[in-house]
Image (cartoon, helix red, strand yellow):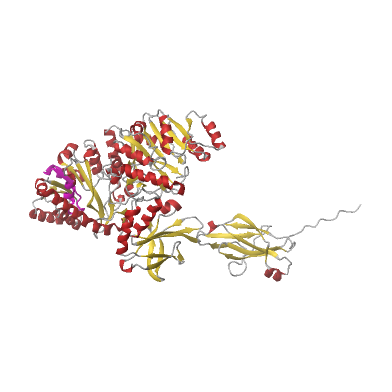
């Protein structure tokens, strides 16, 4: 018997190289000399981890000739993932099938049998658009896109050419909430190029815009436009009156024409220059009112006692403060300066001069430092005026401040008066205006928005009691809250004028709250103590360690709530909405009414049959054309609950206490008719944080496009406050109030503005509306019914807009929204200023 043949084992012999790394692309070749007819598959390693494999099956005739092997297909190309282009160092390596290293020639030197270490720089592209020319300027936006991370960054540099010749270089850093809402990313991506008048002409001019570096031209560039002259402006104004009555397309044309009218525009970044026109206008208005009221008003007008506690002030700032009082156009004042044990010889000498030269200036010296509250109390005791005004030792009053306050009070019966304010630095530069709403008790619980300038009737102040040293740092907040305990809300008067400049210095809270963290704690305590005194149980918390506060109301007894959700098919969206309610609601006494508006899909019908097995859920079938108002009215009529929560089926709640939060907010006042929430787009940008109204806009969602973590203008995207309207995408309404005003208008407002109209009716009936910023949810806006911009909706939307103008156009609340400053444009971002007349 023959012995068995020995089995021979094939030993593969691999050869190859990583030739080149070009961008994210790897190039090279590999061959198995033992079996050159079969392409080799290599393993790709990134940072020591295998991420893919690549087959060497591309032609490489150069390699085939050099190694003398008949293997025409031995090359490879592989593109690394975009995430590698992050500016950080990475190791790139290839392995033969036997796991040995593929040598690298990518370094440019001798072959190395080790992984290549390299850094891939981010690959940027740009998203942009030039909106066009209007109101004397060209506007647009640009964002830089990081292809690796998807990050969208603003504040890009632009080069502008006019007629092919370099004209300007600008930075695209203006706030564009609309862009952030639509695309995500940095909202500070807008630009505005104001064309100087000497550059304007009636001929056509071409403007080209390029983003740097790279000199990449923006989408919508170049812009070829006629820079209008005065003659054309007059003609456009005439056209504007004609087209105002026409359909949406004509309204759009009117907007284009109005945009062509050159008018200087201001935003908060231009505030200092805006004030030059504003204060001239303010002084002219005060002078005109002075003539109107006549000598009797001045002769019989009240004495104002200005209380100014001082402690080691900067001498120049102190001088500026005192002399701003001496410059007042209202002459019937006394300035009581209380030296709180400061023992400054220079200040003492200055005060002695002031007292000698003006008998209206009085000085009280305290032997020791007792703190701002006690020092202020000493001044109040000495006051002889009918009104008391509070004044800090380094701040500045506008010269018409007292007169403007008293003019506003004439013919009314206010007990507390407050104005708007801004901040001033050492150079006299004005910034950070606090344009305040009319009296807002709920906002006052969240922050001392009243602040400066405040005047209180002396008899009321003494009845309220002295300032309390236990709240030093927030003593004025405590005083305002105690005043609300004895002063009816209608006796608080807001004067919407900048009358006070709050000094920014290195150690002031005007510069940074970090200088006085004790004030944050004192503020939380004074709010909590006030709520105890008036009979409310609540937990008060500082938001982000700032002097702005969240009030978490206790809900000892749960009133019944019906959650009303209209829908038509879109079963997955509705299912998700309902599932989140069931999962994220610790509140017990609620039911869900799903209003099925003529669904036809099999899956929807199956969903309805299944969902009602939960006893908390019912389905109301309404087989009619879509009418959002009617659907909600029908569901409300079928409910016996004490509250209705009107909800879009594309609103997804995320906090287990969401319903308890808004019910607690509604129960915090017997006159609260509705409560809304703060809603975000899926990308995290703010979609809704309250609605303001006005003839030019009907309703505007303020803070739209703001980042989720931003506090917004004067913290109004963080602190709960009164608002004129909230969206019915998520709105809690007291059933009693809803019935009183007749519910939603299902005749004139079937789709749009019905929520704004309902809120206006509630406000008109004396109910308050609260924007509760501690109730948050994600809203996939218009997912449920689509956008009003579609052609088939234009006629209906136009009609509803016209109805709102006719219904509310002459009302005071519509002409000047009391929750929004008349100095701010009715736009979403609290950013653009109304040009002073």
Relative to the observer, which residue lies in front, 129 or 18? 129
Magenta residues span: 378-407
The C terminus lies in quadrant: bottom left
Report whether residue 790 is seen. no
> x and y percent of residue 67 in the render?
71, 69
> x and y percent of residue 235 in the render?
31, 60
Residue 400 painted magenta: yes
> x and y percent of residue 211 in the render?
43, 64
Report whether residue 651 is seen. yes
> x and y percent of residue 733 in the render?
37, 35
Relative to the observer, which residue lies in front, 585 or 259? 259
Q: How many marks?
A: 0
Left or right, 574 with respect to 132, comes to right
Relative to the observer, which residue lies in front, 571 or 446? 571
Q: Residue at x 14, y 51 (%)?
A: 290
347 versus 649 height, above or below = below
Left or right, 721 with respect to 181, comes to left
Left or right, 393 with respect to 116, comes to left
655 versus 507 height, above or below = above
Residue 165 painted magenta: no
Q: Residue furthest right?
A: 1
């Amino acid at each position: 018997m023959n012995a068995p043949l020995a089995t021979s084992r094939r030993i593969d012999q691999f050869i190859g190289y990583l030739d080149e790394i070009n961008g994210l692309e790897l190039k090279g070749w590999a061959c198995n000399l033992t079996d050159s007819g079969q392409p080799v598959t290599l393993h790709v390693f990134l940072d020591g981890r295998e991420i893919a494999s690549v087959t060497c099956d591309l032609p490489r005739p150069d390699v085939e000739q050099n190694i003398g092997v008949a293997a025409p297909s031995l090359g490879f190309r592989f593109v690394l993932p975009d995430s590698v282009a992050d500016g950080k160092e990475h190791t790139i390596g290839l392995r033969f099938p036997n796991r040995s290293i593929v040598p690298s020639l990518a370094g440019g030197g001798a072959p190395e049998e080790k992984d290549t270490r390299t850094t891939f720089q981010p690959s940027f592209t740009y998203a942009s658009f030039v909106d066009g020319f209007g109101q004397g300027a060209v506007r647009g936006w640009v964002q830089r896109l990081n292809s690796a991370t998807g990050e969208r960054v603003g504040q890009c540099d632009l080069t502008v050419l006019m007629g092919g010749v370099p004209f300007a270089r600008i930075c695209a850093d203006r706030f564009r909430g609309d862009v952030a809402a639509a695309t995500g990313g940095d909202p500070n991506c807008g630009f505005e190029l104001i064309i100087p008048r000497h550059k304007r002409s009636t001929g056509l001019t071409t403007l080209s815009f390029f983003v740097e570096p790279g000199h990449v031209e923006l989408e919508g560039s170049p812009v070829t436009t006629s820079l209008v002259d005065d003659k054309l402006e007059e003609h456009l104004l005439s056209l504007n009156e004609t087209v105002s009555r026409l359909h949406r397309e004509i309204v759009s044309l009117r907007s284009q024409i109005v945009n062509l009218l050159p008018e200087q525009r201001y935003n908060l970044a231009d505030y200092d220059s805006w004030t030059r026109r504003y204060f001239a206008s303010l002084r002219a208005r005060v002078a005109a009112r002075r003539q109107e009221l006549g000598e009797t008003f001045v002769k019989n007008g009240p004495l104002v006692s200005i209380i100014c506690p001082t402690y080691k002030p900067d001498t120049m700032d102190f001088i500026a403060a005192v002399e701003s009082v001496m410059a007042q156009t209202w002459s019937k004042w006394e300035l009581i300066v209380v030296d709180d044990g400061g023992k400054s010889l220079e200040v003492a000498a200055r005060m002695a001069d002031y007292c000698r030269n003006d008998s209206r200036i009085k000085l009280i010296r305290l032997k020791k430092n007792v703190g701002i509250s006690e020092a202020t109390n000493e001044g109040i005791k000495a006051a002889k005026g009918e009104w008391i005004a509070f004044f800090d030792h380094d701040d500045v009053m506008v010269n018409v401040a007292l007169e403007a306050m008293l003019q506003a009070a004439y013919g009314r019966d206010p007990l507390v008066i407050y104005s708007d304010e801004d901040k001033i630095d050492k150079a006299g530069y004005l910034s950070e205006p606090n344009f305040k709403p009319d009296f807002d008790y709920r906002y006052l619980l969240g922050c001392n928005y009243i602040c400066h300038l405040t005047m209180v009737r002396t008899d009321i102040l003494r009845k309220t009691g002295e300032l309390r040293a236990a709240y030093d740092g927030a003593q004025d907040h405590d005083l305002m809250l105690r005043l609300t305990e004895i002063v009816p809300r209608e006796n608080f008067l807001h004067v919407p004028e900048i009358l006070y400049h709050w000094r920014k210095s290195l150690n002031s809270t005007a510069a940074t709250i970090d200088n006085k963290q004790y004030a944050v704690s004192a503020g939380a305590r004074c709010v909590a103590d006030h709520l105890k005194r008036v009979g409310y149980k609540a937990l008060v918390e500082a938001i982000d360690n700032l002097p702005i506060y969240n009030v978490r109301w206790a809900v000892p007894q749960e009133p019944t709530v019906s959650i009303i959700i209209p829908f038509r098919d879109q079963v997955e969206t509705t299912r998700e909405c309902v599932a989140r309610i069931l999962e994220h609601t610790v509140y017990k006494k609620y039911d869900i009414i799903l209003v099925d508006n003529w669904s036809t899909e099999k899956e929807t019908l199956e969903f309805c049959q299944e969902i009602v097995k939960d006893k908390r859920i019912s389905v109301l079938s309404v087989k009619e054309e879509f009418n959002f108002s009617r659907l909600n009215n029908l569901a409300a009529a079928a409910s016996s609950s004490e509250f209705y929560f009107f909800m879009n089926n594309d609103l997804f709640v995320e906090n287990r206490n969401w319903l308890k939060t808004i019910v607690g907010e509604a129960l915090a006042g017997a006159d609260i008719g509705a409560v809304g929430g703060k809603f975000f787009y899926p990308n995290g940008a703010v979609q809704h944080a309250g609605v303001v109204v006005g003839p030019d806009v009907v309703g505007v969602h303020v803070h739209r496009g703001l980042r989720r973590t931003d506090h917004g203008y004067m913290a109004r995207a963080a602190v709960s406050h009164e608002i004129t309207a909230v969206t019915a995408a998520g709105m809690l309404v007291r059933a009693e109030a809803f019935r009183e005003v007749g519910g939603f208008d299902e005749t004139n407002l079937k789709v749009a503005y019905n929520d704004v109209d309902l809120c206006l009716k509630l406000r008109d009936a004396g109910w308050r509306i609260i924007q509760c910023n501690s109730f948050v949810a994600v809203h996939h806006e218009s997912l449920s019914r689509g956008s009003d911009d579609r052609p088939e909706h234009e006629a209906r939307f136009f009609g509803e807009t016209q109805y709102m103008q006719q219904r509310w156009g002459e009302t005071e609340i519509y002409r000047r929204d009391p929750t929004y400053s008349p100095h701010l444009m009715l736009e979403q971002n609290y950013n653009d200023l109304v040009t002073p007349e």
